[in-house]
Image (spheres, coloured by chain):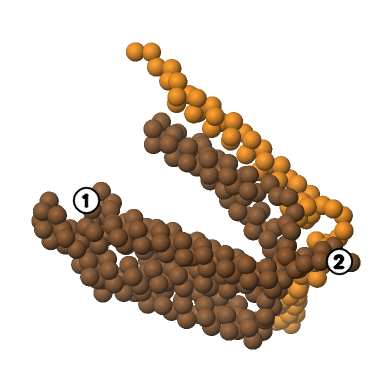
Chain colours: A brown, B orange
Amino acid sequence: MAHQAHAYHMVDPSPWPLTGAISALLMTSGLATWWHYKTTTLLFLGTTLLLLTMFQWWRDIIRESTFQGHHSTPVQKGLRYGMVLFITSEVFFFIGFFWAFYHSSLAPAIELGGLWPPTGITPLDPFEVPLLNTAVLLASGVTVTWAHHTIMEGARKPALQSLTLTVLLGLYFTALQAMEYYEAPFTLADGVYGCTFFVATGFHGLHVIIGTTFLMVCLLRHTHYHFTSNHHFGFEAGAWYWHFVDVVWLFLYISIYWWGS
Amino acid sequence: MYRHIHALQQVARRTISSSVRRQLDNKVQNKQKLFQEDNGIPVHLKGGVSDALLYRTTMMLTVVGAGYVVYELVKAAFPRNKT
């Protein structure tokens, strides 16, 4: 019984854009009340609302696609464009932080000692944990590609194994980076070096956590038979995001960790 | 005695593996039937009672939160400090 004469998806009315917008309002004003009045209620409320919104909105998208079949080929094409544009916007977000780093490090101010790293800063050895982190992320790029091929081939067990391995590598990176942050001989407050280092690597770390979560959801969905061998865009979007995170790290490693030391 | 232990092992193994198999069965078709039912319910409530509970909780937090933000902003804009 057909209800529409076109292949596009006319979505049901949904409350999640509103709850998401309110959560953004609560989080931003929550930051203000936290910094000015030391109360975290609004921030906590906003974050809870954000998590609830994300869970229900994405749950609904899974229902609309896997269970209701609304993701026809033109719809999927639109989603592909959307993910590409989103990742492009994130690339520009990181370009800003790399701009800041190069602005300060290519012509170091006299107040820094006229050199980079600035006087008094002991940079991390790029051939210790940062090199391990590079290997971990590169390996995870291989495992996620392996996972894609096994999904396309319909090989269930290897797909679950390779996807699990990718997630584990992502978690390992986060744990190693957290330890590095704790042990670092400099802090965010250590001038422009500390600022550019922790803001750039910090936002990257946040994106690793987001990417790992995305892949964990893909793993969960694959165990529940949501993906077929020729329709698994949710996984592809996650894999694209993961490769983007990997590439950003490579730029961070070369620029900040290696050249910047 | 060892025969008992062996039998217990076999029962345990069979129970564990069969319950695991039950958990990982392909339930997509059941979900498809549930979510394609022509009952006019929007997708965010179509899963059942737990959907409605979660929705109500989220909406309550939204309304309370929005109200609380307005209160805090008014408080911040008109400080009641007596010096």
Disc number lying in front (2 or 1): 2
* Residue B78 location, quadrant: top left
Amino acid type, residue under disc 1 in the picture: Gly
Q: Which residue is mark 1?
A: A191
In percent of width and height, residue A235 lies at: 59, 72
Number of residues whose C-alpha sits closer than 10 Å to that of mark 2, classed few (under 14), some (14–19) or many (20 or more): few
In percent of width and height, residue B6 lies at: 71, 81
Q: Which residue is mark 2?
A: A2
Please, which chain is the residue tagged with disc 1 on?
A
A46 relative position to B16: left or right: left
Q: Pick out the residue farthest to the top.
A: B83
- Relative height, residue A79 to residue A30 (above, below): below
Please say whether residue A188 is visible from this viewpoint: yes
Q: Which residue is located at x 47 percent, y 41 percent? A: A28
Number of residues whose C-alpha sits closer than 10 Å to that of mark 1, classed few (under 14), some (14–19) or many (20 or more): some
Please, which chain is the residue tagged with disc 2 on?
A
Q: Which secondary structure, mark 1?
A: helix
- Relative height, residue A131 to residue A10 (above, below): below
- Relative height, residue A122 to residue B27 (above, below): above
A207 vs A156, nearest the viewer: A207
**Sequence-earlier tag: 2 or 1:** 2
- Specify the quadrant that holds the C terminus of chain A: bottom left
A15 vs A215, nearest the viewer: A15
In percent of width and height, residue A112 lies at: 14, 54
